[in-house]
Image (tube, rainbow, N blue to C red):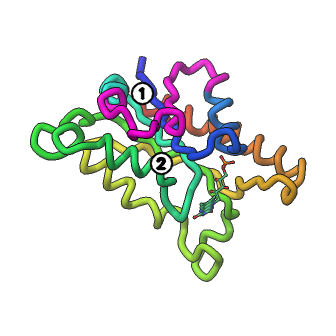
Amino acid sequence: MQKILVINGHPNPEASVAGKAVLNALESSRCEMQIRTLAQLCGPNGFDVTAEQEALRRADVIVWHFPFYWYSVPAILKKWIDDVLTRGFAHGAGGTALHGKKLLLSFTTGAAAQEYAKGRAMNWPVEAFLPPLLQTAYLCGMKTLAPVWSNGMIFIPGVHTEADRERILKQAEEHAARLLDEIKACAEN
Ligand SMILES: Cc1cc2nc3c(=O)[nH]c(=O)nc-3n(C[C@H](O)[C@H](O)[C@H](O)COP(=O)(O)O)c2cc1C
């Protein structure tokens, strides 16, 4: 049985609609996993790096779950990456703790899928923004699974409608199902 660790990189999990719905769907699946919510774990002195590294050591599959912010991860997840994936642990001499583990990027975007194209608002396909994260995994010896993302997931109360919320919740369930399929497929290979 693969041990799955989900790093929830939402800076404001209480206000999340899409990301929270994905996590709810994952939690109500029969798949066992640990979810670590960075906004709850980052105290005035930052993260407990030892605890974060121990959680990573125990995991076989690591999921970075986050809302897409400025074409990347939110600052709190970037801080976690900076602070936790240290030399000697995740890379550099003796830094083999993550070797062979699998990393899956799971994220939601505000913009609709058709905006991620040349000449449209985002001007590039979503995949064009992922190499720094994929390379981070590579340097740490992790194997990346196919990223799972959902577009058009922004919900602003008072701006978006109940119908929008319903669509987002449905897409979030499909997102969670794709994510679980991806993890199951890698367990079989
Ligand atoms: C600071 C900030 C930056 C954002 N940057 C992007 C972006 O680069 N591309 C995009 O499609 N959406 C962007 N969004 C929209 C979020 O990705 C979207 O609201 C989020 O995925 C919805 O998930 P949530 O309900 O879990 O917060 C941004 C939102 C914020 C607040």
Q: Determine the residue located farthest toward the front in the rendered image.
A: 44
Residue situated in front as seen by the camera: 64 or 30? 64
Quadrant of image for the C terminus: top left
Pinpoint residue 75: horizontal percent, then vertical percent: 47, 54
> Start and end of the magenta stretch?
27-53
Residue situated in front as seen by the camera: 13 or 115? 13
Q: Is residue 52 magenta?
A: yes
- Residue annotated with mark 1: 187
| Ligand 1 image position (quadrant) | bottom right
Q: Quadrant of residue 121?
A: bottom right
* Helix, strand or loop for disc 1: helix
For badge 2, the amino acid type reads Ile
For badge 1, the amino acid type reads Ala
Left or right, residue 115 beside residue 129: right
Pinpoint residue 86: horizontal percent, then vertical percent: 24, 43
- Residue annotated with mark 2: 76
Tell me what residue is drawn at x 56 percent, y 32 percent. Answer: 180
Decide: is 135 above or below 37: below
